[in-house]
Image (cartoon, grey):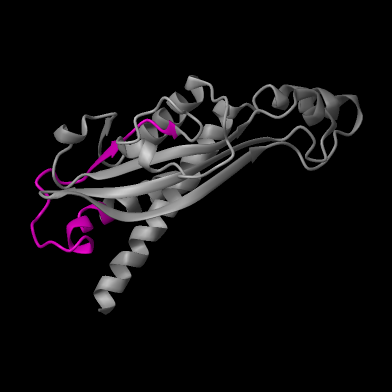
Amino acid sequence: MKTLLTAALLAASISTSYAQSGTNEPPTTGRSAVILRFAVASDSRADWATLPQQACPQSNNLAGLPVDPNVLDAISNELQTRLSKKMSVTMDADPNAIPVGALVISGCITRADPGNAGGRLIGMNLGTSYLDAHVKVLAKKETGFVPMGEFDVQTQGGKKLPPIGPIGLAAHAAAERRETLSADAAKLADQLLKKVAKMMKAQRGAMQNA
């Protein structure tokens, strides 16, 4: 239910993206969003002219950061699944083909640590996995892409408490198999949408009070 409410709030905010970006022209496509496949901060071969790569920090110590492509796909798929319940969603569109009025979600993975499966069986946050990203939100208008805001999102997978007894250990072991970076991608998508909704709600409120 919370996910649906977040998507609904975001959908309602998209129609005001033009006013927030300083133009009176109405969006021509209604409620629509474009999700771009996240970039990776350490990818030295990447094209820095692309929108996702522009979301990466210019200076970092993430050289050699390995990120499974399946994790990037999982983030895009989760965002599409959640948003498509309330609006039209396109994935990895050509920037030149993105319709005027669309909200564009672009991001960059800044941390991807799968943790340690053995440590997670112990609990106490040992072996915890981490997945962090920097996200940029833009609106497409006639003159190009207008920044709406940017923020960081962080997720982690692990247990604070150790398992109690054989049953607890078995449950812990079963849960551990689901605690992967791909699973963290679902958490990251959820946090991302909540932050986008909150950001756009604040901008809408600021406009109403101006």
Query: Is 9 left or right of 20, judged from the image as shown?
Result: right
Where residue 23 sits: x, y (%)? Answer: 13, 61
The structure residue drawn at horizontal position 28% and vertical position 78%, both measured from the top left corner, is: 209
Residue ranking furthest to the bottom? 210
Can residue 1 be seen from the camera position used here?
no
> Hey, which quadrant is residue 24 in on the image?
bottom left
The structure residue drawn at horizontal position 50% and vertical position 41%, both measured from the top left corner, is: 133
Span colored in magenta: 13-39
The structure residue drawn at horizontal position 81% and vertical position 22%, both measured from the top left corner, is: 170
Foreground of the two, 192 or 81: 192
Foreground of the two, 193 or 47: 47
Where residue 26 sits: x, y (%)? Answer: 9, 55
The answer to if 38 sits in the magenta stretch is yes
Query: Is 207 left or right of 29, judged from the image as shown?
Result: right
Query: Is 60 left or right of 16, judged from the image as shown?
Result: right
- Say above or below: 91 vs 13: above
- Say above or below: 31 vs 97: below
- Please tell me how many numbered marks the rendered image carries: 0
**Quadrant in which the C terminus appears:** bottom left
Where residue 92 sits: x, y (%)? Answer: 29, 29
Query: Is 140 left or right of 147, judged from the image as shown?
Result: left
Foreground of the two, 11 or 73: 73
The answer to if 159 sits in the magenta stretch is no
Can residue 39 be seen from the camera position used here?
yes
Where residue 197 sits: x, y (%)? Answer: 38, 54
